[in-house]
């Protein structure tokens, strides 16, 4: 079997593949990532600091020892001239100083005269021999001291010229002395074993401190990563409870700003779901009621006819006319429902948009509705402020204007009026439909776009309303990225104002 992970084809048994997948999932854990971040951020500086301290210690200690021994050897070099050691070859004071420094630094001091003969060796193995080396020759010819550190062999080598300064010697502008004679050199080898041993002790102590630091940092990383992700774990648990249906209450975990923001967003979605659920329940109840009412009426009429054996023809005609009216009403409800469902499905799809003459479209709708207005003795008034051409779905806009004007006629007073005003600016066109009708109470304005909502249920059924017209109208406006607004006063009339962009742009 082959399991792919991270782009690699790994052939593993099924149980190992399962373990591998679980391990990969764990690497996505926020707690694990926080643990590693805290652990390494705290540990790496400790390791770097230990290595830096030990390395710097060697450099500093070697530098200090070079300086100290160089100063001491320059002092001894002056004493060699003072006690005329190079000519006489013996001095208890000089021998004591040489022995003391050799013993103090576990080193070796060799005194060489200008003929490269070794006059004194603190190891007493090379006295009287000739020493030819680059360091000695350089010290004799240049008359300057220098030092070098051999880290591999663990010693410091210092070359100190033995110079005499006769009376009358001068110093040039470059800092060189004239009249100085180099009478020999001292070659000093100083052990750095004590420095290395001290470095090793410091390193050991650093490792111990580092180990303690690792334990502390490990504990701290476990605690902090757990404490940091605990609110998210609780949040996930609460969300699972809501998802499983054990709870339907808002979540409040405000330990951190992030969890508070997530809770607020989740609670907003939860509240919206509750509203949608309530809306669905109400919608189903309304649909059931609306569809059941005509059927009940038809059943009552049919039962009344069946109960009368010798019912006259006129009664049959009257009752059958009523039944036909109820069937027509049922048909309107079903057609409106189908239209609304199609509108919901097409809310995210493309409209059949084309350049349309809104003035001509509005006039066509008003001409079609004029017979209804004449029957109700309602005057239709159309005011076109300017010519308007816009990119719209002609069918949707026709339905929108029809619903608004038809409602204004149906819910109007006898001998009333309906005024339709069309205007535009450089971005939008505005359609205003005003009437002299019964008006809408203020508490109902927020619900008029809800499906099956009726301000006056008895009057609406009397005139044949289904309660879906404004829902369809609002859907058409939103699909064009427009705005619909309503203002009304009971007994004085209602005004609907629609604002729609002249150019349709997909969002």
Image (tube, rainbow, N blue to C red):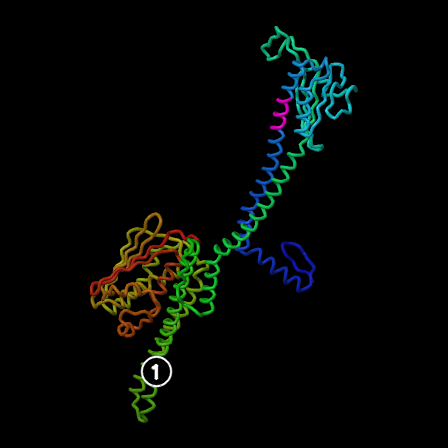
Q: Neighbour class for label 1 at 10 Å: few (<14), some, many (≥20)?
A: many
**87 and 458: which one is in front?**
87
Look at 31% across and 84% down and name the residue there: 319
Dominant secondary structure (helix, strand or loop) of the stretch shown in magenta: helix
- For residue 406, say whether it is visible: yes
- On whether residue 67 falls in the magenta region, the answer is yes
- What are the residue bounds of the magenta stretch? 63-72
Q: Residue 212: image x %, image y %?
A: 57, 48
Look at 63% across and 26% down and name the residue there: 66
The residue identified by callout 1 is 298
Look at 53% across and 49% down and name the residue there: 38
Look at 59% across and 13% down and name the residue there: 175
Q: Residue 83: image x %, image y %?
A: 67, 14
**368 and 410: which one is in front?**
410
Q: Quadrant of residue 304?
A: bottom left
- On whether residue 70 falls in the magenta region, the answer is yes
In the rendered view, does 247 fall on the left or right side of 68? Answer: left
Q: In the current view of this chain or complex, which residue is farthest to the top?
A: 168
Q: Quadrant of residue 384?
A: bottom left
Image quarter (top left, top right, bottom left or bottom right) of the N terminus: bottom right
């Amino acid at each position: 079997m082959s399991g792919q992970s991270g782009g690699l084809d790994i052939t593993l048994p099924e149980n190992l593949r399962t373990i591998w997948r679980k391990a990969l999932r764990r690497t996505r854990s926020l707690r694990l990532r926080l643990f590693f971040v805290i652990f390494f951020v705290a540990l790496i500086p400790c390791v770097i600091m230990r290595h830096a301290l030990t390395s710097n210690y060697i450099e500093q200690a070697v530098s200090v020892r070079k300086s100290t021994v160089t100063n001491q050897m320059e002092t001894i070099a002056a004493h060699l001239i003072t006690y005329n050691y190079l000519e006489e070859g013996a001095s208890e004071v000089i021998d004591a100083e040489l022995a003391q420094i050799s013993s103090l630094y576990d080193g070796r001091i060799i005194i060489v005269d200008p003929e490269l003969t070794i006059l004194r060796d603190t190891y007493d193995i090379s006295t009287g021999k000739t020493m030819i080396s680059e360091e000695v020759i350089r010290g004799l010819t240049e008359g300057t001291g220098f030092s070098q550190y051999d880290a591999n062999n663990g010693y410091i080598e210092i070359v100190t010229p033995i110079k005499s300064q006769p009376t009358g010697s001068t110093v040039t502008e470059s800092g060189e002395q004239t009249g100085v004679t180099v009478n020999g050199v001292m070659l000093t080898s100083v052990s750095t074993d004590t420095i290395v041993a001290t470095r090793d002790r410091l390193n050991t102590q650093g490792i111990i401190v580092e180990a303690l630091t690792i334990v502390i940092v490990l504990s701290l990383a476990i605690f902090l990563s757990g404490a940091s992700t605990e609110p998210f774990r609780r949040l996930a648990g609460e969300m699972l409870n809501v998802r499983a249906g054990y709870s339907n209450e808002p979540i409040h975990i405000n330990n951190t700003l992030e969890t508070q923001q997530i809770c607020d967003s989740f609670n907003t979605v939860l509240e919206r779901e509750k509203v949608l659920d309530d809306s669905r329940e109400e919608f189903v109840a309304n649909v059931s009621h609306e569809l059941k009412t005509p059927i009940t009426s038809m059943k009552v009429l049919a039962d009344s006819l069946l109960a009368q054996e010798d019912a006259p023809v006129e009664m049959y005609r009257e009752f059958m006319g009523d039944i036909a009216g109820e069937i027509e009403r049922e048909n309107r409800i079903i057609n409106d429902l189908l239209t609304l469902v199609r509108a919901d499905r097409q809310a995210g799809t493309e409209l059949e948009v084309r350049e349309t003459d809104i003035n001509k479209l509005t006039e066509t709708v008003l001409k079609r509705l004029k017979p209804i207005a004449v029957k109700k003795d309602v005057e239709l008034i159309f005011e076109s402020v300017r010519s308007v051409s816009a990119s719209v779905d002609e069918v949707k806009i026709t339905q929108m204007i029809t619903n608004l004007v038809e409602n204004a006629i149906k819910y109007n007073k006898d001998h009333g009026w309906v005024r339709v005003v069309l205007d535009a600016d450089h971005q939008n066109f505005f359609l205003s439909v005003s009437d002299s009708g019964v008006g809408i109470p203020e508490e109902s304005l927020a619900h008029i776009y809800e499906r099956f909502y009726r301000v006056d249920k008895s009057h609406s059924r009397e005139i044949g309303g289904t309660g879906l017209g404004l829902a369809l109208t609002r859907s058409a406006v939103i699909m064009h990225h427009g705005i619909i607004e309503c203002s009304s006063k009971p007994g004085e009339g209602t005004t609907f104002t629609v604002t729609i962009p002249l150019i349709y742009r997909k969002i």
